[in-house]
Image: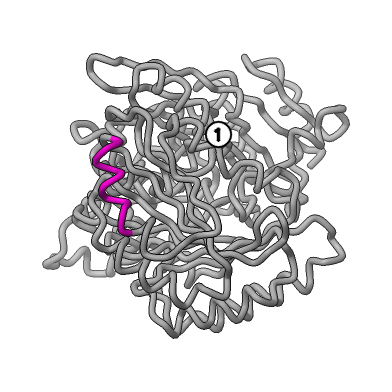
Amino acid sequence: MSRIEGHLKALRTDLRGTMVRPHDLDYDAARAVFNGMIDRRPQAIIRCAGASDVIRGIAFARDHDVALSVRGGGHSISGKSVCDGGLMLDLSAMKGARVDPQRRTARAEPGLTLGELDHGTQRWGLATPLGVMSRTGIAGLTLGGGLGWLNGAHGLTCDNLLAADLATADGRLLSASNNENDDLFWAIRGGGGNFGVVTSFHYRLHPVGPVLAGGLSYPLREASKVLPFYDQFAKGAPDELSTAASLGFDASGQPTISIVVCYCGPIDAGERALHPLRTFHTPLEDGIQPTPYRTFQSAPDTGFPTGRRHYWKSGFLPNLTDEAIDVMIRFVAHVPSGATGVGLQHMHGAATRIDPAATAFAHRADQYDFLIASQWSDEAHSAPNIEWTRAFFEAMQPHLDSSVYVNNLGDEADPRVRAAYGANYKRLADLKATYDPDNLFRSNHNIKPTPIAPIPADGPRRTSHPEPLAPIPRRNDRSAGNTRRPGC
């Protein structure tokens, strides 16, 4: 790596932001991410102050054949936002936001967390659908889809993206929307960080005032009674009511099942809609009440502190059958860590009424996002927690769909990555070949560019397939003999 030391020093003086190197005092803090199992050491970290720093970082990685990773909120379980030995673009200082309450839109930079964006939009009684934890970054959430508490009424986060600016592998800053670079706009709504670095998001907002939200809790031994009723209730719920079930341990260490709800319409209508759920069986606790939306969004934060070790397994669960419930009860009763939880976030309503081919996010069925969120603090406990999670996930296989929500995906093999993009993988791979043919953006749940077919000796042949998009011209092309290092 010494061959580029001089170039890194020159780059450092050319930035609006700052560069952090391994010898700097704040290096370990700068490379740390949410998942404490991730311990990677980039050669340099650029704390970007704006789009110009992003473009400079991309050009440096491309021209010097250096691995590149991109950090927004640093909240992904896979930890792919930080790489070993390469260059990390840290966008966390890019926190600009501008809300237009008349047009009900917001422009937001990629370093914002969900809570920070909500802070700006809720001042006007508005919100865009986001996730379920306030410390999650908006960038990765949006690019992977964005399943949260407003999905029934207003769809996923990516469904409410109106436009984006992003820096591409060849050093351009492009605007993407339905009217400009629409193929790229399609790809970034569910295709992850495979196509460039987004420097600005433009969202549609919706009126969201205080919500009727909170949870009902029951002893785990009553799950076989509670969950079937919940399943029937959730699948008949109005769009304004989004729900989730979870199995884990309460504050006193008792195994419990919780039903969490968020009604984003008039409170009195929410009271009527929730009455059957609140009265079918007496809970240990009923915490459902009118709540500021921001308060509800931050409620889970304390249960997921930064630095714990995480190992997650996830898949879409089409039906909450008795057999699937039995598997959950059996494994949760013997979980190695009291901090671990099993989640069933319901996707329904507006999020499911969009054509699977309309955006890169393909999984548009009424279903549950099933998540085994294992977490623990002591490294010595890693083996039993990982073993338990894998065994649990294997036992759930007969009940799960083959697809998976990319934002829950760990560091897994290519078949699982393909399952995350589903039926849209082929089109995404073709677009990857157009916008990032050398796979510079590969420290992610990677979509490999479609190989360019060789031209036959007798010339190109006409086929019934549409012509591929023309490749984007690249600056400073290297010689054909130069090969790239493996990705992070």
Q: Classify residue 139 as left or right of residue 188.
A: right
Q: Nearer the viewer, residue 97 or 446?
A: 97
Q: Main secondary structure of the magenta part?
A: helix
Q: Residue at x 50, y 22 (%)?
A: 51
Residue 254 percent across, percent down from the top left: 68, 64
Quadrant, the N terminus: top right
Identify the colour scheme used: one colour
49 is higher (above) or lower (below) than 88: above
Q: Quadrant of residue 124?
A: top left
Q: Residue at x 70, y 20 (%)?
A: 18
Res 188 seen here: yes
Count the numbered circles shown: 1
Q: Nearer the viewer, residue 199 or 226?
A: 226
Q: Secondary structure at mark 1?
A: helix
Q: Which residues are magenta?
A: 267-276
In the image, is residue 272 part of the stretch drawn in magenta?
yes
Q: Classify residue 487 as left or right of residue 109.
A: right
Q: Nearer the viewer, residue 50 or 316?
A: 316
Q: Residue at x 28, y 27 (%)?
A: 207
The amino acid pointed to by label 1 is: Ile
Res 454 seen here: no
The residue labelled by disc 1 is 58
Residue 160 percent across, percent down from the top left: 29, 37
30 is higher (above) or lower (below) than 346: above
Residue 484 percent across, percent down from the top left: 61, 52
Q: Nearer the viewer, residue 401 or 80?
A: 401
Rate crowding at label 1 as few (under 14), some (14 to 19) or many (20 or more) other CA atoms within 10 Å: many
Residue 280 percent across, percent down from the top left: 36, 64
Q: Residue at x 74, y 39 (%)?
A: 31
In the image, is residue 479 part of the stretch drawn in magenta?
no
349 is higher (above) or lower (below) than 342: above
Q: Classify residue 464 as left or right of residue 417.
A: left
